[in-house]
Structure formats: C-alpha cells, structure tokens
Amino acid sequence: MKRDDSIQQIKERRDWDLLVIGGGASGLGVALEAVSRGYRTLLVEQHDFSKGTSSRSTKLIHGGVRYLRQGNFTLVRDALRERGYLLRNAPHLVHDLALVVPVYRWRDLGFYGSGLKLYDLLAGRLRLGWSQLLGRDEVIRRLPTIKVRGLKGGILYHDGQFDDARLAIDLAKSIAARSGVVTNYVQAVSLLKNGAKTAGAVVRDMLSGEKYEASARITINATGAFADHVRRLDDENAPPLVAASQGTHIVLDASFLPTRTALMVPKTEDGRVLFAIPWYNRVIVGTTDVAIKEASLEPVPLAEEVDFLLRHSALYLTRAPTTKDILSVFSGIRPLVSAKKGPTSALSRDHQVLISESGLVSLVGGKWTTYRKMGEDAVEAAMKTGRLEPRSGTDTRALRINGSALGQPALTDSLHPALPVSREQVITGVQEEMACTIEDVLARRTRALFLDARAALEMAPAVAKIMAEELGRDEAWQREQVESFRSLAKNYLPSSVAR
Ligand SMILES: Cc1cc2nc3c(=O)[nH]c(=O)nc-3n(C[C@H](O)[C@H](O)[C@H](O)COP(=O)(O)OP(=O)(O)OC[C@H]3O[C@@H](n4cnc5c(N)ncnc54)[C@H](O)[C@@H]3O)c2cc1C
C-alpha cells in the first residue's frame, strides 16, 4: 500500500464507480464491500486512517449488552452475528475476551445472569462461550483487585476485543489488495455535479496542496461526526442529522487490574455501563457520554469525564487511581443519528443510509462491530439509485482481512523501556502502511500514544530519525515533526484535561 501510487491513480483516472469520503470504520467498510463486488473504488481520508472516532473506541467487538435493557434484541442479534464474522475474518486482530460483572446484591445475580443468558442465545452458533454464574472466590480469582466488601458473586460472559486502529490499517490494505485505491491525507473539498446529480468530488492532497477531480458514479459520505459538513457541500440547507456525543477513556498501569479478564459495571450513577479492560499490558477504563456542540478531529477530555472515571474506578478497585496514575487519556466522538426522518431509507435503528436528491449517499451512526453490515447496506443503497449495475455481495467468509497482529517486540529491542515499539514497526509503518508523520506511527500504526503518552513523547525524536531516513527528510523536518507531535500529545496527558 503506497501513497504515491494512490495519488498517481487519482491523477490519471476519472472513471470511479464509487468515491468514498472518510477513512474510518464506516468508509473502510463501504470500500471493502465495493471492491469485493468488483466496483472501481477510491477512498479518500483527509487525515490518517482512523484518525477520527475509529481509533478511540473501547476496543470491544460486541453485541452491546446495554441494548438488551432497552429491549432492542434485533440490534443485539445483528451485532452478535457481525462479531462472529469478524472473529473469523480477522483472527489476528480480534479475540475472545472474558468479562465479569461483579454483583453486590443477591437479586442482581439473577437479573444480570438471565440477561446474559439471553445474550448467549441471541449469538446462536456464533456464540463465543456460555455465560456462567461465579461464586465470590472465583470472581476474586478472576479479578484479583476487585473490592470484596459485600461481594456476593458475579457473572462471566464473553465478547470480542480488538485493536481498532490496526483493524483500520488492515482494512485499508485489504481494499488495496483487491485493486481498490485508498489514501490518507486527501480531503474532499467540494462535490462535482453533473447537472443536478453529485458526480464525485474535488479532492485536495493535504501534503502537496494539489487539487484533483475525482469523478465517480456514486459518492458516499462516510465522514462520521462530520457527515453534516459534507451533506452541506451537497445541499447547503441540509438539516442537521448527527448529534455529537463525546466519550473518554483513561489508561492505567496493569497493576490496577492484573488479569486477562475485564470488569464490566452494568450501571453507573448516570445509568451507563463502564468497562475496565486489559489491553496491551495496560487497563483502559471508560467511557463517558457528554453531548457536544461541535465535532473536532482531536477532541479534548473534560475534567468532569476524568473525575467520573476515577470515581467509578475507586468504587470497584481496591487501589483507587488518581490523576497521577493516568498514563494516557483519550476522547472520541459518537456520530449519533439525531433525525429519523428525511428522504431516506432507514436500514437499521443503529445506522442509517440516506440518499439525497442529488444522489449523495450518506452512511451515519453505527459502530465498529457492524462496519461490514454498514458497508453492505450503503453499497446496496447505492445500487438502488440505478447508477451502478447491480452485483451480488460476496459470502461474508470471503471478506477475510489481510494483515498480522501488532507485534510485541521485547522491551530490550524497543525504542523506549516502557513500551514495546521497535525500529522495524516504524519502518513497516512508513514503507507499507502510509505512515507520514510521527503521530501516524505512535498513535495508530503502534498504539504508544494511547498506552503511555509520556513514553510516546520521549520516543518521538527516535521515531522522527528513523522516519527521516526512510523518507529522505532532513533535520528541520524532524524538528518540526517532534514539535507538532509534542503539542498533540499534550492532549493525552492528564495535566492537559480541560478544567
Ligand atoms: C467513546 C467511544 C467508544 C466506542 N466504543 C466502541 C466499541 O467498543 N465497539 C464498537 O463496535 N464501537 C464503538 N464505538 C463506536 C465506533 O467507534 C464508531 O461508530 C466508529 O468508529 C465511527 O466510524 P466512522 O467511520 O463513522 O467515523 P470516523 O472514525 O470519525 O471516521 C470519519 C472520517 O472521515 C474523515 N473525513 C471527514 N471529512 C472528510 C473530508 N471532507 N474528506 C475526507 N475525509 C473526511 C475524518 O477525518 C474521519 O477520519 C465507540 C465510539 C466512541 C465515541
């Protein structure tokens, strides 16, 4: 996957079947579905793949236990089916995760136990394992740092866990391997029109500043929290569709929950679920839900969110974490669908596909787990416009995702004593995965920034040097890169939290 080759293709070709705008879970899902059906497909991402929400999730491939409480069984069943496909299609990145719900009131044991049994049943043959009631001692064995006072027992159940940004990179590679063209750092700046019909976009290479026309029979807006912005490029009076909600996670040292089992709290004081999940030898605690006015690519965690996460961690863990213990803090923006009406075909309550009068297809809402189904629904809606000759979808087995797991090099071979990031990973990122900046390498090709922001900052000069050798850049480039990474990484340090 080479960026220069993709740019060359954008310059030379004017006959795309599909132009996909946005390189997060939604856009990558659409593009993989489209190339699998043999459509000539171009995907442009204005920053890096998964720079938006898609690198900032809770890292669960799940049906969504909380939807059970809302009685939304179809949604849960569909997501559990997708969970099963994803475990099969990307076994190098998605694995079975055991989660335990600790119970402090006898009546909750039956309540949550029966809910999770239903969860097992909804998964059908794609079940990862049966849920089980656990005695108090077994809960303590599974979660050694759980608060034991009043603990009655617990329920163990299964979901999938993954590395979101790595999955995005591997999806991009899989699209390229099937002759699709994908590129990062290319923004759709305006839409091309053929009469009243949308017919592609003018795109700008954000690294060179050059602009090109990418004509396409169908244009798909898969820009997540930015979907309304692109819809207004099509129709300046398009009503708002996306309600943005921010969710934040804190990352702690593994000693706060030294186990491979995750802790799931089914009901916090604001009625949400909360997870503490082991991930790459750290613990991720999240998340929150705060309505925000304006979506940004680099959302800033709020003090109230961090306080909420620390307070709830302290309710369940024997050692109460403090701000000083936070290794990294990151926020993402949920692109929730706020309007249910319009010239639309509502394909699911979780995600929606809308087709504007000009034929612009917008895919909004959804979640990582259902990215494949979202892609399928968007491509099928595009076919229904009559601008693409219908082609049948592939069997879900054929959507195998190329790639290998993020290696965990020995710390002795690492660029930093606290995090396993190797020279080879940096080189692979640049040569094969379109990494253009230190941030691309440390935030998404490896997960250093999300796992330990200070360590990531400290290794930035070494990463800049390796990248400069690969890209033929000088010392001024290295200095500028380190400076810009430094100002970004501050957002991930607890001291930067907006108070
Ligand atoms: C806190 C939180 C936790 C979550 N946890 C989970 C979880 O555990 N499991 C799960 O399944 N789901 C989870 N989700 C949901 C999931 O992460 C999102 O639904 C998904 O990542 C959204 O993907 P997207 O592609 O729609 O949006 P994004 O990832 O934001 O991608 C949109 C992309 O479009 C690009 N873009 C915008 N405008 C343009 C333009 N003009 N030209 C080119 N590119 C453009 C942006 O740069 C961006 O990269 C979570 C969400 C949040 C917020």
Image (spheres, grey):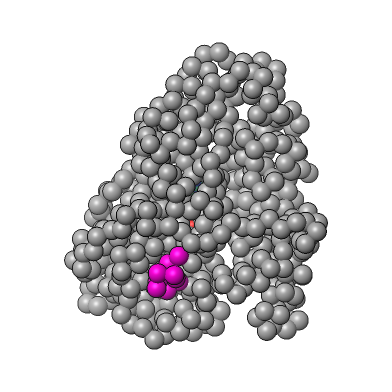
Q: Which residues are magenta?
A: 174-182
Q: Quadrant of residue 468?
A: bottom right
Q: Is residue 283 left or right of residue 373?
A: right
**Residue 52 percent location from the top left of the image:** 52, 59
Q: Is residue 453 left or right of residue 331?
A: right
**Residue 424 percent location from the top left of the image:** 69, 68
- Residue at position x 68%, y 52% in the image: 451
Image: 402 above or below 465: above
- Residue at position x 74%, y 32% in the image: 320
Image: 44 above or below 405: below
> Between residues 313 and 35, which one lies in front from this camera angle?
35
Q: Quadrant of residue 117?
A: top left
- Residue at position x 55%, y 28% in the image: 156
> Between residues 240 and 127, which one lies in front from this camera angle?
127
Is residue 468 covered in magenta?
Answer: no
Q: Which residue lies most toward the left here?
A: 386
**Residue 137 percent location from the top left of the image:** 67, 19
**Residue 409 percent location from the top left of the image:** 71, 58
Q: Quadrant of residue 178?
A: bottom left
Image: 67 above or below 253: above
> Between residues 67 and 132, which one lies in front from this camera angle?
132
Q: Is residue 467 left or right of residue 111?
A: right
Q: Visible in this render: residue 227?
A: no
Q: Visible in this render: residue 170?
A: yes
Q: Is residue 108 left or right of residue 85?
A: right
Is residue 180 covered in magenta?
Answer: yes
The total number of labels drawn is: 0
